[in-house]
Image: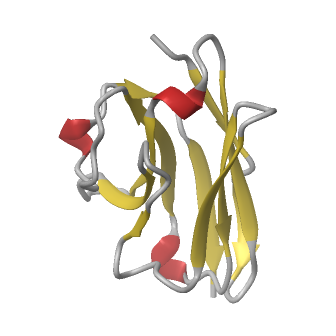
Amino acid sequence: QVPLAESGGGPVQADGSLRLSCAASGSSSSSYTMGWFRQAPGKGREGVALLSLGGRLIYADSVRGRFTISRDKAKNTLYLQMNSLKPEDTAMYYCAADPAPNRRLLSDDFRYWGQGTQVTVSS
């Protein structure tokens, strides 16, 4: 099991930036496929970005070119740099991990989840 704790969310104006962090405790996050997901009110959970076990980066079409997923192995922390934010990016953002070599942005493929951090983008 790998407890995950997200931080860094908050209110931001459109075209602004935020960096989300996901601190993993216990096992090294390098042993897991790591992902970011989001869920807006009344909508299903949507995959945003994935860092595979082999280091491949995968993004949803809606965020490609604006968001960047990365990891600091020394700090055992996953990041999501979000630039050029839009009101439609408003959602609760979740960090997720799974020991399998996933390459799909599907929530069912991830076993461990954080509690989420809220991002609200105003126009």
The foreground one among 33 and 92 is 33
Give the vertical position of 13 relative to 23 (above or below).
below
Residue 58 visible to an observer of this rendering: yes
Q: How is the image coloured?
A: secondary structure
- Residue at 68%, 79% in the rendered image: 83
Q: Quadrant of residue 108?
A: top left
- Outermost residue to the front: 54
- Residue at 53%, 80% in the rendered image: 87
Q: Quadrant of residue 85?
A: bottom right
The foreground one among 22 and 92 is 22
Q: Quadrant of residue 6?
A: top right
Give the vertical position of 33 relative to 111 (above or below).
below
The quarter in which the N terminus is drawn is top left
Report x, y in % for residue 3: 55, 17
- Outermost residue to the left: 108
The quarter in which the C terminus is drawn is bottom right
The foreground one among 115 and 68 is 68
- Residue at 57%, 30% in the rendered image: 29
Instruction: Judge from the rendering whether residue 70 lies leftward or rightward of residue 37; answer left or right.
Output: right
The foreground one among 49 and 19 is 49
Give the vertical position of 13 relative to 51 (above or below).
below
- Residue at 34%, 81% in the rendered image: 61
Residue 114 visible to an observer of this rendering: no
Instruction: Judge from the rendering whether residue 90 lies leftward or rightward of residue 76; answer left or right.
Output: left
Report x, y in % for residue 105: 28, 56
Give the vertical position of 70 relative to 72 (above or below).
below
Report x, y in % for residue 20: 69, 53
Report x, y in % for residue 50: 43, 55
